[in-house]
Image (spheres, grey):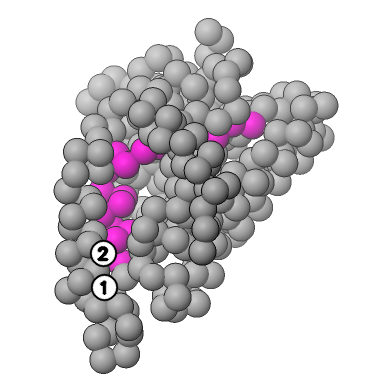
C-alpha cells in the first residue's frame, strides 16, 4: 500500500490516539491533531518513545476558526474526522443549549471543515478521502443517548450525500461505526447529564437514571476492547477500496441489521 498523508482530528485520546500511532507505525505520514494544548506533549512523548518521527502533533479545535484556517494549510490527502462529544440524558428534558453544542461539535463543525478540505482538493485537482467516525448510534437509538444518536444520524446522511456527490472528483467517503468500546467516551457522555438533572425540576430522577446507565455500561457488550476497533480503522483508513459503512464488531452489525428490519413493524 502506498504511504498516505493523513490528518486525524480528536487524536488526544481514545480511537484517535490509537489510530494515529498505529498508522504511523505502518509508515504513513500522520498529523495527529488534539483539541487542547495540554494534550500535545503526552502524545509527542508517546510517538518519540516509539520512534515515530513521521507522526506530527498539532492543536486543532474544530470549533476554533483560527485553528481550522491554519490546519487547512497542512498537506494531507486523507481526513479522519474523528473529533466529537456526547450528551446523555432524556431527550424530552435535556437543555437545548447542550443539544445545540452537541450538533455544533459532531455535525456542523466537521461538515464545515470537510467542505473546505474538499474545495482545496478540487481546486488542486487532487484525489482524496474523508473517513467520518460515526457510531452504532448512527443507525439506531440507544436508550439514554438520543441526542448523541441524532448527531450521528445526521452525520450518516451527510456522509452518504457526499459519497454520491464527490465520485466524479475521485474523492472517497467512508464511515466507521464503533460498537460500545471501553474508551471512556460512553461513560463520559452518560455522566454529562448529571450536571443538569435536578430532582426538584426534572421528571427523570438522578438515582433511577444512574442505576440505568450503570447497568447498561457494565455488561460485556458495553465494555468491548477498543484495540479491535483501532485495528479495523488502521486497515480501513489508508485503503483505496472498501465498504462505505464499516460497523465493528460483527455482532453489532448483525444487531443493527435486525433492528432496522424490525423497526418497520414497530407500533405505538
Q: Which residue is mark 1?
A: 194
Element class at badge 1: helix
Q: Residue 166: percent from the left, percent from the top? A: 76, 33
Give yes or no for contact between labels 2 and 1 (Cβ–Cβ under 8 Å).
yes
Q: Nearer the viewer, residue 243 or 60?
A: 243
Is residue 143 at all visible to an observer of this figure? Answer: yes
- Report the residue marked by disc 2: 191
- Disc 2 crowd rating (10 Å Cα; few below 14, some 14-19, many 20+) is some
Residue depicted at 53% across the width and 14% down the height: 3
Specify the label residue 170 is tagged with: none
Residue at 31% x, 50% y is: 185
Secondary-structure class at tag 2: helix
Q: For residue 204: magenta?
A: no
Q: Farthest bottom residue?
A: 200
Q: Is residue 4 above or below residue 84?
A: above
- For the residue carrying disc 1, how many other residues have a C-alpha within 10 Å: few (<14), some (14-19), or many (20+)? some
The span picked out in magenta is: 173-192
Give left or right: position of 109 versus 34. Answer: right
In the displayed structure image, the side of residue 22 where residue 120 appears, left or right: right
Vertical position of residue 204 compared to residue 158: above or below: below
How far is the residue under mark 2 from the one under mark 1? 6 Å
The image shows residue 21 at horizontal and vertical percentages of 34, 27
Quarter of the rendering containing residue 165: top right
Residue sitting at x 56%, y 10%: 2
Amino acid at each position: 500500500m502506498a504511504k498516505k498523508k493523513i490528518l486525524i482530528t480528536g487524536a488526544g485520546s481514545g480511537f484517535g490516539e490509537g489510530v494515529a500511532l498505529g498508522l504511523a507505525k505502518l509508515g504513513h505520514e500522520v498529523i495527529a491533531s488534539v483539541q487542547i494544548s495540554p494534550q500535545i506533549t503526552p502524545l509527542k512523548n508517546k510517538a518519540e518513545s516509539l520512534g515515530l518521527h513521521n507522526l506530527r502533533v498539532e492543536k486543532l479545535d474544530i470549533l476554533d476558526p483560527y485553528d481550522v484556517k491554519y490546519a487547512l494549510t497542512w498537506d494531507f490527502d486523507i481526513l479522519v474526522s474523528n473529533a466529537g462529544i456526547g450528551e446523555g440524558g432524556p431527550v424530552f428534558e435535556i437543555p437545548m443549549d447542550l443539544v445545540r453544542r452537541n450538533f455544533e461539535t459532531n455535525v456542523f463543525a466537521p461538515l464545515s471543515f470537510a467542505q473546505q478540505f474538499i474545495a482545496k482538493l478540487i481546486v488542486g485537482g487532487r484525489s482524496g478521502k474523508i473517513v467520518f467516525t460515526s457510531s452504532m448510534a448512527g443507525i439506531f437509538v440507544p436508550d439514554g443517548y438520543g441526542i448523541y444518536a441524532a448527531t450521528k444520524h445526521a452525520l450518516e446522511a451527510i456522509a452518504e450525500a457526499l459519497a454520491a456527490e464527490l465520485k466524479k472528483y475521485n474523492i472517497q467517503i467512508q464511515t466507521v461505526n464503533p460498537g460500545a468500546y471501553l474508551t471512556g467516551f460512553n461513560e463520559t457522555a452518560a455522566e454529562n447529564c448529571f450536571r443538569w438533572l435536578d430532582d426538584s425540576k426534572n421528571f427523570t430522577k438522578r438515582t433511577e437514571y444512574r442505576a440505568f446507565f450503570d447497568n447498561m455500561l457494565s455488561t460485556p457488550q458495553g465494555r468491548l476492547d477498543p484495540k479491535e476497533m483501532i485495528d479495523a480503522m488502521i486497515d480501513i483508513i489508508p485503503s483505496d477500496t472498501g465498504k462505505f459503512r464499516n460497523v465493528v464488531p460483527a455482532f453489532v452489525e448483525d444487531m443493527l441489521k435486525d433492528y432496522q428490519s424490525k423497526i418497520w413493524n414497530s407500533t405505538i
